[in-house]
Image (cartoon, rainbow, N blue to C red):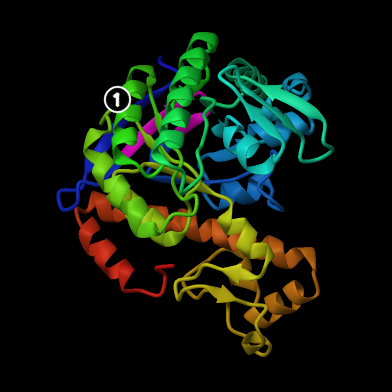
Amino acid sequence: MKEFDYKVVHVCKQSGARVGKFVTPHGEITTPVYMPVGTQATVKSLTPQELNDAKAEIILSNSYHLYMRPGHKLVEAAGGLHKFMAWDKPILTDSGGFQVFSLSELRKITDDGVEFRSHLDGSKHFISPEVAMDIQHGLGSDIIMAFDECSKYGAEHSVAESAMKRTLNWLDRCKKYHENEKQMLFPIVQGNMFSDLRKISLEETLPYAECGLAIGGLSVGEPKPLMYSLMEEMQPHYPENMPRYLMGVGSPDCLVEGVLRGIDMFDCVLATRIARNGTAFTSQGKVTVRNAVYKEDFSTLDKDCDCYCCRNYTKAYLRHLINTDEILGGRMLSLHNITYLIKLMHRIRDAIMQDEYLDFVKEFRNSPEYC
């Protein structure tokens, strides 16, 4: 039996959006799928059981942060991420490339790799494509990312081209170094906001893609219409026989629009980040419970949600928790937001299976949920 496999189950006759089945060593994933982010080997404040109850199928962890603390060698000694964090479903790890470029001001990028100083203590480190593979091999995730260079939004064409070419060079080195059949290597398409570079990147990347492809360098500050336009332009060029992963995207509107443009996998820290600040995604749009208007609001957070938070707590109580910095407030809103996004993906799948996804998109765009 193959360790990894992907099959398209249904293509919506109305929109061309698709539902698929992605087999991994730690279980099967139905796509399109939203992946909760567990940066430090934990989805902030939530237990694996709570994630299971929310029907999460796969989570993402961050190689850079786990390399810094506690170290990939320690995680490997613990039996890998699955045992370390008591999660028995699939895990995807990113390569750490984006964090190296975004978190470290003191860095030197060469064709060999990246020399940088830790954002924690200033200590000096070096990550090459081979080191990025070693880190992810130690973590033992099911899906690993090639080491890439993500150029900043607004970069000139020549700068974006240089980063794209370096990403291709690093991909070749990652592929040659990676030999673990229980880990699927996803190459990453780069090219910034330039469609010519993205098409070249995709063409040169495809020979390295076995059962998955990532789209990087989007949702990095550009206007959403520009992101959607680039996605539409690239969609006809993606292979049909593997999942396409749009990195770092996870707001409700972007999930709906991304699926319409051929994306199968999404991740983002947004759901738990805004929860800790007192904001929830709901069927009636965003609700920021810390606001005074909810002080005496004894209604449930979301009448259309059956998560533990919505079954038990009112907006007034959640406001009290958030405004007094009680941990339970952020926990409950995080649980609700993760549950909401996973249920949204289920609604999307149902619309695709019923060949009604264009109708779903039109209705969603006109709803308060579109945020």
* Residue drawn at point x = 55 percent, y = 19 percent: 111
- Residues shaded magenta: 20-28
Q: Quadrant of the C terminus?
A: bottom left
**Please, what is the three-letter code of the amino acid marked with disc 1?**
Glu
Please tell me whether the stretch drawn in magenta is mainly helix, strand or loop: strand
* Residue 216 location (% of width, % of height): 45, 38
Quarter-of-image position of residue 263: top left
Can residue 297 be found in the magenta stretch?
no
At a point 72% along the width and 20% down the height, the residue shown is: 76
27 part of magenta stretch: yes
- The vertical placement of 266 against 342, above or below, is above
| 332 relative to 240 in the view: left or right | right
Considering only vertical position in the picture, is 268 above or below 207? Answer: below
- In this view of the protein, which residue sits in the foreground, 280 or 27? 280
Residue 296 placed where, x, y %?
Answer: 67, 90
Percent x, y of residue 38: 64, 43
Identify the residue under disc 1.
203
For the residue pair 61 and 83, the one nearer the viewer reads as 61
Q: Residues within 10 Å of mark 1 (few under 14, many from 20)?
A: few
Residue 158 appears anywhere in the view? yes
The vertical placement of 331 against 98, above or below, is below
Quarter holding the N terminus? top left
